[in-house]
Amino acid sequence: MLALFLVAACVEEYTLDATPPTVEEAQFEFESTAESDNILNFRANGDFFMMNWDLGNGSQGSGKTIVGTYPLAGEYTVRLTVFNAGGSATYSEVITIERTDPVLLDKPLYNMLTGGPTATEGKTWVLDSARAGHFGVGPNPSQAGDFPEWYQAQANEKAGGGMYDDRYTFLLANFGFIMQTNGDVYINAAQGPNFPGATDSGVGDLRAPYTPPSTLSWSIVEPADGDPLLTIANGGFIGYYAGGRTYQIVNITENELFLRFVDQANEALAWYIRLIPAGYDSGGEPEPEPEPEPEPGDVNFTLADLIGDGAKTWKLKPAAGAFGVGPNPGSDEWYPGGADLSTERACLFNDLFTFTEDGDMVYDAQGDIFGEAYMGVATEGCQAESSLEGLVGAAWASGSHEFSFAPGSGATNPTITVTGTGAFLVLPKAYNGGEYAAGPPEDDKSVTYEVIDYVNENGNEEVTITINISPDGGIFWSFVLVPADNG
């Protein structure tokens, strides 16, 4: 066990005076834990209104205390920066980890990425180029979920760009990373000046000659409130270079690594790449065939079904598949991928939409909403409806709007159109052919939803509606509604 190491004994009382802190006041102490000599508890000696840590292992944090994990033997430089009203000071200390702790390396995340302790040559990943959606882009911050909402490359669409023949090997030993480029890489056009010899790839953006360093490494930080963050150090990157080397691990399994990363030349964009192990055929395990969509005109849903005896209230069905987005009507393939969000987004599933025989649609948020950045709210997630007051999203609060209903015919499905400033069903930002990136909504806008399915079994009803938000018809939000009195 490492002995308790006292860096400084002086403890400052909390202060917000104009005198900057000293380096001595930024000192800290640390000790090993009972669990492992390689897991250390750090504690700042002073008390300041902000204390930021860099643990030297790829992890960062804030607060008076923090825990650092060091699976591998070696030296690590730990830095603590403290702040008061007068300024800041940083103290750094090199700590030595005497022995590698194999137990700390035996983690499911590490094992899936590297192949585990028995994979002495590591695990090699490549772009899943034969699968649609292996590369794409969406908004940052994410709005519909972490997937390439705005564009998804089709199978082999970027052939010749310099990305498909690259290989990325992760080793557990010393967190090594081997990047094989076969001479060139695929880069964002804005990064061209950083790559001498970059030329037009012929498939958009640039292809550039690049020989990666031989001293590459990887590290992972696992924040308590988000996805793991994978960083490639010393000059390497994965797939498509957009200026950064840190990747959000959206999903990882034995046979898939789905990464998200922010464009450093345009932080409003997030790029996505999907990788598979070298030699693995992702087509060998096809996704289940989706249920056939009802043919236009086959949906028997009428105005009487919508408004009942004069007024009828609908809400989201509290079940998986009731709320999602995908490449086809009724699909939630891209988000949430079959997950049941009725608990996580309870504030969305309790919303009520009442249709009356007078042509009114009354929206009742039940006192809470699922706030997102485009509404102007300070934080995203379930919150009081009152948080919209005075913001650009206020028009999306509870209120009354007009609606119209068009019955289906032999060639078309029924449609429901809501009209008014802030009129919507289920998801405020979605409209025909697009999504709001910022409020307020367009004045007196009409939004039309297609009814693609209706089931009424022994009085238990559910209706599925969809809205196409892509100008070229490739992105559909779909919702399953049930009468509010169904429970």
Image: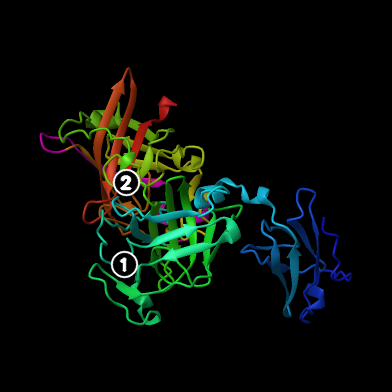
Q: Quadrant of residue 332?
A: top left
Whichever of labels 2 and 1 marks the residue nearer the N terminus, that label is 1
Is 66 in front, or is 448? Answer: 66
Q: Quadrant of the N terminus?
A: bottom right
Q: Residue at x 67, y 59 (%)?
A: 72
Residue 133 position, x and y percent, is 32, 53
**Amino acid at the residue labelled 1:** Gly
In this orientation, which residue lies closer to the viewer: 190 or 77? 77
Query: Residue farthest to the front?
Result: 120
Colour treatment of the image: rainbow
- Can you give x and y, in whole percent of width and height, for residue 286 in the image? 31, 39
According to the picture, the residue beneath numbered tag 1 turns out to be 162
Measured Cα–Cα span from mark 2 to mark 1: 29 Å
| Image coordinates for residue 90, horizontal then vertical, percent | 72, 76
Residue picked out by circle 2: 326
Q: Is 394 colored magenta in this rendering? A: yes
Q: Which residues are magenta?
A: 384-412
